[in-house]
Amino acid sequence: MGLKVVVIGANGRVGRILCAQLKANDKFDTPLAIVRTSEQVQYFENQVGVYASLTNIEDSNIDEIADVLEGYDAVVWTAGAGGKGIERIFTVDLDGAMKVIEACEAADVKRFVMVSAINAEHREFWWHTALRNYYIAKRTSDFVLRHSSLDYTILQPGSLLSGEGTGKLCPEDRVQETRSNHYQIEREDVASVIVECLANPAKTVKKTISLANGDQPISEFIHTL
Protein backbone atom coordinates (compact mmCIF):
# COMPACT_ATOMS: atom_id res chain seq x y z
CA MET A 1 0.00 0.00 0.00
CA GLY A 2 1.47 3.35 -1.04
CA LEU A 3 1.23 6.71 0.68
CA LYS A 4 -2.30 8.12 0.55
CA VAL A 5 -2.17 11.81 -0.41
CA VAL A 6 -4.82 14.53 -0.53
CA VAL A 7 -4.21 17.43 -2.94
CA ILE A 8 -5.91 20.70 -1.95
CA GLY A 9 -6.24 22.97 -4.97
CA ALA A 10 -6.00 20.01 -7.32
CA ASN A 11 -7.56 21.89 -10.23
CA GLY A 12 -4.78 24.46 -10.31
CA ARG A 13 -1.98 24.01 -12.80
CA VAL A 14 0.49 22.62 -10.25
CA GLY A 15 -2.26 20.51 -8.68
CA ARG A 16 -3.25 18.85 -11.96
CA ILE A 17 0.34 17.93 -12.75
CA LEU A 18 0.87 16.66 -9.21
CA CYS A 19 -2.22 14.43 -9.27
CA ALA A 20 -1.04 12.85 -12.52
CA GLN A 21 2.47 12.29 -11.13
CA LEU A 22 1.16 10.70 -7.93
CA LYS A 23 -1.16 8.48 -9.95
CA ALA A 24 1.77 7.25 -12.06
CA ASN A 25 4.15 6.61 -9.13
CA ASP A 26 3.93 3.20 -7.44
CA LYS A 27 5.15 4.66 -4.14
CA PHE A 28 1.73 6.28 -3.77
CA ASP A 29 -1.85 5.12 -3.55
CA THR A 30 -4.42 6.79 -5.80
CA PRO A 31 -4.57 10.42 -4.58
CA LEU A 32 -7.66 12.38 -3.59
CA ALA A 33 -8.26 15.64 -5.47
CA ILE A 34 -10.13 18.34 -3.52
CA VAL A 35 -12.09 20.47 -6.01
CA ARG A 36 -14.80 23.10 -6.12
CA THR A 37 -17.21 22.00 -8.89
CA SER A 38 -18.93 18.83 -10.09
CA GLU A 39 -17.32 19.32 -13.52
CA GLN A 40 -13.90 19.17 -11.84
CA VAL A 41 -14.92 15.99 -10.00
CA GLN A 42 -15.82 14.38 -13.32
CA TYR A 43 -12.53 15.52 -14.90
CA PHE A 44 -10.37 13.99 -12.17
CA GLU A 45 -12.34 10.78 -11.86
CA ASN A 46 -12.88 10.14 -15.57
CA GLN A 47 -9.79 11.64 -17.24
CA VAL A 48 -7.05 11.58 -14.60
CA GLY A 49 -8.25 8.42 -12.87
CA VAL A 50 -7.98 9.68 -9.28
CA TYR A 51 -10.49 10.08 -6.50
CA ALA A 52 -12.18 13.47 -6.16
CA SER A 53 -14.13 15.22 -3.42
CA LEU A 54 -16.41 18.20 -3.99
CA THR A 55 -15.25 20.22 -0.98
CA ASN A 56 -15.16 24.01 -0.96
CA ILE A 57 -12.43 24.88 1.53
CA GLU A 58 -13.69 28.46 1.89
CA ASP A 59 -17.21 27.42 2.90
CA SER A 60 -16.42 24.23 4.84
CA ASN A 61 -15.69 24.23 8.56
CA ILE A 62 -12.79 22.41 10.20
CA ASP A 63 -14.83 19.33 11.16
CA GLU A 64 -16.17 18.97 7.61
CA ILE A 65 -12.66 19.19 6.15
CA ALA A 66 -11.32 16.75 8.76
CA ASP A 67 -13.98 14.22 7.74
CA VAL A 68 -12.70 14.33 4.15
CA LEU A 69 -9.07 13.93 5.25
CA GLU A 70 -9.74 11.01 7.59
CA GLY A 71 -7.65 7.95 6.76
CA TYR A 72 -5.12 9.73 4.55
CA ASP A 73 -1.38 9.96 5.24
CA ALA A 74 -0.48 13.36 3.83
CA VAL A 75 -1.96 16.62 2.58
CA VAL A 76 -0.49 18.90 -0.08
CA TRP A 77 -1.66 22.52 -0.23
CA THR A 78 -1.44 23.88 -3.79
CA ALA A 79 -4.53 26.12 -3.63
CA GLY A 80 -4.51 29.85 -4.24
CA ALA A 81 -6.81 32.77 -4.88
CA GLY A 82 -5.37 33.19 -8.37
CA GLY A 83 -5.28 36.98 -8.32
CA LYS A 84 -9.03 37.29 -7.69
CA GLY A 85 -8.86 40.04 -5.09
CA ILE A 86 -8.01 40.60 -1.47
CA GLU A 87 -11.13 38.91 -0.08
CA ARG A 88 -10.30 35.59 -1.76
CA ILE A 89 -6.64 35.93 -0.78
CA PHE A 90 -7.73 36.00 2.84
CA THR A 91 -10.41 33.30 2.55
CA VAL A 92 -8.21 30.92 0.52
CA ASP A 93 -4.49 31.59 1.03
CA LEU A 94 -4.87 32.63 4.66
CA ASP A 95 -7.97 31.29 6.41
CA GLY A 96 -8.41 28.34 4.03
CA ALA A 97 -4.87 27.14 4.62
CA MET A 98 -5.21 27.62 8.38
CA LYS A 99 -8.45 25.60 8.43
CA VAL A 100 -6.81 22.74 6.58
CA ILE A 101 -3.86 22.77 9.01
CA GLU A 102 -6.28 22.53 11.94
CA ALA A 103 -8.30 19.85 10.13
CA CYS A 104 -5.15 17.77 9.62
CA GLU A 105 -4.48 17.91 13.35
CA ALA A 106 -8.08 16.92 14.08
CA ALA A 107 -7.94 14.01 11.59
CA ASP A 108 -4.46 12.89 12.74
CA VAL A 109 -2.93 13.47 9.31
CA LYS A 110 0.64 14.33 10.27
CA ARG A 111 2.36 15.03 6.93
CA PHE A 112 1.72 18.41 5.27
CA VAL A 113 3.44 19.96 2.25
CA MET A 114 2.68 23.65 1.73
CA VAL A 115 3.30 25.40 -1.58
CA SER A 116 4.05 28.97 -0.52
CA ALA A 117 6.05 31.74 -2.25
CA ILE A 118 9.70 32.71 -2.52
CA ASN A 119 10.98 34.87 0.36
CA ALA A 120 7.61 34.89 2.12
CA GLU A 121 9.25 35.45 5.50
CA HIS A 122 11.27 38.47 4.25
CA ARG A 123 9.01 41.53 4.34
CA GLU A 124 11.58 43.75 2.67
CA PHE A 125 11.26 41.58 -0.45
CA TRP A 126 7.51 42.11 -0.95
CA TRP A 127 6.22 44.92 1.28
CA HIS A 128 6.36 47.62 -1.41
CA THR A 129 5.03 45.46 -4.23
CA ALA A 130 1.57 44.78 -5.67
CA LEU A 131 1.76 41.30 -4.11
CA ARG A 132 1.88 42.57 -0.53
CA ASN A 133 -1.56 41.26 0.53
CA TYR A 134 -0.84 37.88 -1.05
CA TYR A 135 2.48 37.67 0.76
CA ILE A 136 0.94 38.68 4.09
CA ALA A 137 -1.41 35.72 3.71
CA LYS A 138 1.38 33.34 2.68
CA ARG A 139 3.74 34.44 5.46
CA THR A 140 1.02 34.04 8.08
CA SER A 141 -0.13 30.60 6.96
CA ASP A 142 3.51 29.45 6.80
CA PHE A 143 3.99 30.73 10.37
CA VAL A 144 0.91 28.87 11.59
CA LEU A 145 2.10 25.66 9.93
CA ARG A 146 5.57 25.93 11.49
CA HIS A 147 3.98 26.23 14.92
CA SER A 148 1.54 23.36 14.41
CA SER A 149 2.04 19.74 15.44
CA LEU A 150 2.39 18.62 11.81
CA ASP A 151 5.40 17.17 10.01
CA TYR A 152 5.54 20.01 7.53
CA THR A 153 7.57 20.96 4.49
CA ILE A 154 7.14 24.51 3.18
CA LEU A 155 8.13 24.94 -0.47
CA GLN A 156 8.73 28.50 -1.63
CA PRO A 157 8.90 28.58 -5.44
CA GLY A 158 9.69 31.64 -7.48
CA SER A 159 7.75 32.84 -10.52
CA LEU A 160 5.85 29.88 -11.96
CA LEU A 161 6.30 28.99 -15.64
CA SER A 162 4.16 26.78 -17.88
CA GLY A 163 6.76 25.04 -20.03
CA GLU A 164 8.18 21.55 -19.83
CA GLY A 165 9.90 20.59 -16.58
CA THR A 166 13.69 20.70 -16.55
CA GLY A 167 14.17 18.23 -13.71
CA LYS A 168 16.79 20.55 -12.25
CA LEU A 169 16.91 23.13 -9.45
CA CYS A 170 19.21 25.84 -8.22
CA PRO A 171 21.09 24.60 -5.12
CA GLU A 172 19.61 26.12 -1.96
CA ASP A 173 22.75 28.05 -1.09
CA ARG A 174 22.67 29.76 -4.50
CA VAL A 175 18.97 30.57 -4.87
CA GLN A 176 19.38 34.25 -3.99
CA GLU A 177 21.80 34.58 -6.91
CA THR A 178 18.87 33.91 -9.27
CA ARG A 179 17.00 37.08 -8.31
CA SER A 180 17.86 38.75 -11.61
CA ASN A 181 15.93 35.90 -13.27
CA HIS A 182 12.93 36.37 -10.93
CA TYR A 183 13.58 32.99 -9.29
CA GLN A 184 11.72 31.31 -12.15
CA ILE A 185 10.65 27.66 -11.98
CA GLU A 186 8.49 25.41 -14.15
CA ARG A 187 5.25 24.22 -12.54
CA GLU A 188 6.07 20.65 -13.53
CA ASP A 189 9.28 20.89 -11.52
CA VAL A 190 7.37 22.18 -8.48
CA ALA A 191 5.09 19.13 -8.71
CA SER A 192 8.12 16.85 -9.03
CA VAL A 193 9.67 18.38 -5.91
CA ILE A 194 6.45 17.78 -3.98
CA VAL A 195 6.56 14.11 -4.94
CA GLU A 196 10.20 13.84 -3.84
CA CYS A 197 9.43 15.57 -0.53
CA LEU A 198 6.61 13.14 0.19
CA ALA A 199 8.87 10.21 -0.70
CA ASN A 200 11.79 11.51 1.41
CA PRO A 201 10.42 12.76 4.74
CA ALA A 202 13.71 12.26 6.57
CA LYS A 203 15.31 14.88 4.31
CA THR A 204 12.42 17.35 4.13
CA VAL A 205 10.31 17.38 7.32
CA LYS A 206 10.38 20.62 9.34
CA LYS A 207 12.13 22.48 6.51
CA THR A 208 11.39 25.59 4.44
CA ILE A 209 12.85 25.17 0.96
CA SER A 210 13.33 27.87 -1.69
CA LEU A 211 12.85 26.71 -5.29
CA ALA A 212 14.13 28.00 -8.60
CA ASN A 213 15.33 26.21 -11.71
CA GLY A 214 19.04 25.64 -11.99
CA ASP A 215 21.52 22.90 -12.84
CA GLN A 216 21.15 20.40 -9.98
CA PRO A 217 18.97 17.30 -10.55
CA ILE A 218 15.94 17.27 -8.24
CA SER A 219 16.86 13.96 -6.59
CA GLU A 220 20.35 15.28 -5.83
CA PHE A 221 18.88 18.56 -4.54
CA ILE A 222 16.63 16.67 -2.09
CA HIS A 223 19.48 14.57 -0.73
CA THR A 224 21.64 17.65 -0.04
CA LEU A 225 19.02 19.24 2.23
Image: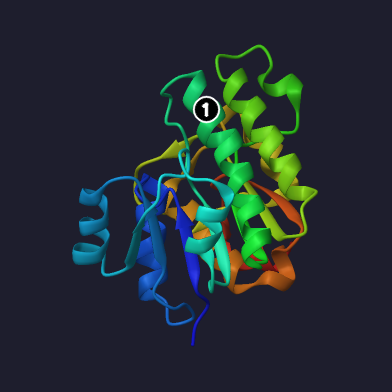
Residue found at the very far top of the displayed protein: 128
**Is residue 131 or residue 4 the one in the foreground?**
4
Q: Is residue 167 left or right of residue 223?
A: left
Image spot of residue 200 (x, y percent): 64, 72
Q: Give the secondary structure at mark 1.
A: helix
Residue 95, quarter of the rendered image: top right
Q: Residue 93: in sight, yes or no?
A: yes
Image vertical order of residue 25 relative to residue 128, above or below: below
Q: Position of residue 11 (x, y in %)?
A: 34, 48
Q: Quadrant of the C terminus?
A: bottom right
Residue 132 appears at what percent x and percent y? 62, 19
Left or right: 44 as drawn, with respect to 8: left
Placement of 222 over or under 118, stated as above or below: below
Residue 182 versus residue 37 in the image, above or below:
above
The total of numbered circles placed on residues is 1
* 207 sits left or right of 63 in the view: right
Q: Quadrant of residue 63?
A: bottom right
Query: Which residue type does callout 1 highlight?
Result: Ile
Residue furthest to the bottom: 1
Q: Quadrant of residue 48?
A: bottom left
**Residue at figure coordinates x 49%, y 48% from the top left:** 78
Other-residue count near label 1 (Cα within 10 Å), few / some / many at <14 / 14–19 / ≥20: many
Residue occupying the point 67% across, 39% down = 141
Rendering colour mode = rainbow
Residue underneath mark 1: 89
Q: Residue at x 49, y 81 (%)?
A: 27
